[in-house]
Amino acid sequence: MGVGGNMSVPSTKSEQNKNRLQRMPTSKPPFTIGDIKKAIPPHCFQRSLIRSFYYVARDLLLVSVFYYIATTYFHLLPSSYCYLAWLTYWIVQGCVFTGIWVICHECGHNAFSSYPRVDDTVGFILHSALLVPYFSLKYSHSRHHSNTNSLEHDQIHVATIKSELEWFYKYSNKPLGRLLQLVATLTLGTPFYWTFISQERIITALYVTLIHMHLYITTVRGYGSTFQT
């Protein structure tokens, strides 16, 4: 703080960059992942098959109700209100489908129930209905969690060194460039990620996609033995 309570502002870009680096945590935190887990109440780690299926049934019921309302009554509205109603429907229905996607995400983490085969069956069926390759996403997402923030092995959210993409940074750091990046990410980024998983592991990703159906068949065949063990 300067005289009179005014905050001093760095005068040069080098000083600004230096201050940014000083604010970044570089040392290990005084706690571990194990410490965090111990601080969480044990009941938070208990998985309930009944409660999980309740959420599945609830979301599917909401999807059906919203679809019935939209297809039965929207055409009775005046044209101007009809467009507004469909826009509202897309937003609300999209939120519910996102909830279903999250349920499948939890199936991939085996957090849906204590039975991995049940998790994979539910996740495969629901994710396939959403046009999402369940097993490919489960494989890549697990690699992401085991290599979070790793510049060499993480699957997503990996920062690119500015010096390696100088020409790209020149245009992407502007409003139009950021808009184009956002559009490309939302329209092409996710499908490409699900298809190829990562540039370094394209062959592995394609292999995972090819055995997608094989894993499902194995899951269904072993479904009955899950409750026998």
Image (tube, rainbow, N blue to C red):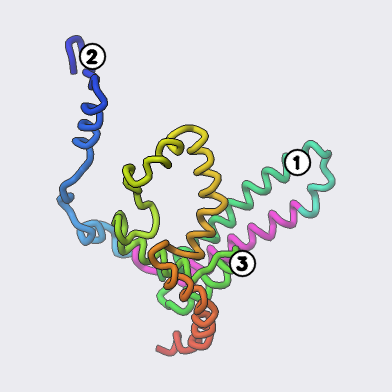
Q: Residues within 10 Å of mark 3 (few under 14, many from 20)?
A: few
Q: Residues within 10 Å of mark 1 (few under 14, many from 20)?
A: some
Separation of residues labelled 1 and 2 (CA atoms): 53 Å
Residue 221 vs 192, above or below: the answer is below
Judged left or right of residue 17, residue 202 is right
Q: Amino acid at mark 2?
A: Asn
Rendered image quadrant of residue 109:
bottom left
Q: Residue placed at 48% from the left, 60% from the top?
A: 193
Q: Nearer the viewer, residue 104 or 209?
A: 209
Report the residue marked by disc 3: 129
Query: What residue range appears in magenta?
Result: 44-70
Judged left or right of residue 64, residue 185 is left
Kindly state the secondary structure of the residue where label 1 is placed.
Answer: helix
The residue sitting at the front extreme is 167
Q: Are marks 2 and 3 in contact (CB under 8 Å)?
A: no
Residue 25 visible within the image: yes
Separation of residues labelled 3 and 1 (CA atoms): 26 Å
Q: Amino acid at mark 3?
A: Ala
Q: Nearer the viewer, residue 208 or 44?
A: 208
Q: Nearer the viewer, residue 183 or 173?
A: 173
Separation of residues labelled 2 and 3 (CA atoms): 58 Å
Tell me the tag on residue 83.
Answer: 1
Q: Residue placed at 50% from the left, 85% from the top?
A: 218
Q: Residue placed at 47% from the left, 66% from the top?
A: 137
Report the residue marked by disc 2: 6
Q: Is residue 51 magenta?
A: yes
Judged left or right of residue 26, residue 64 is right
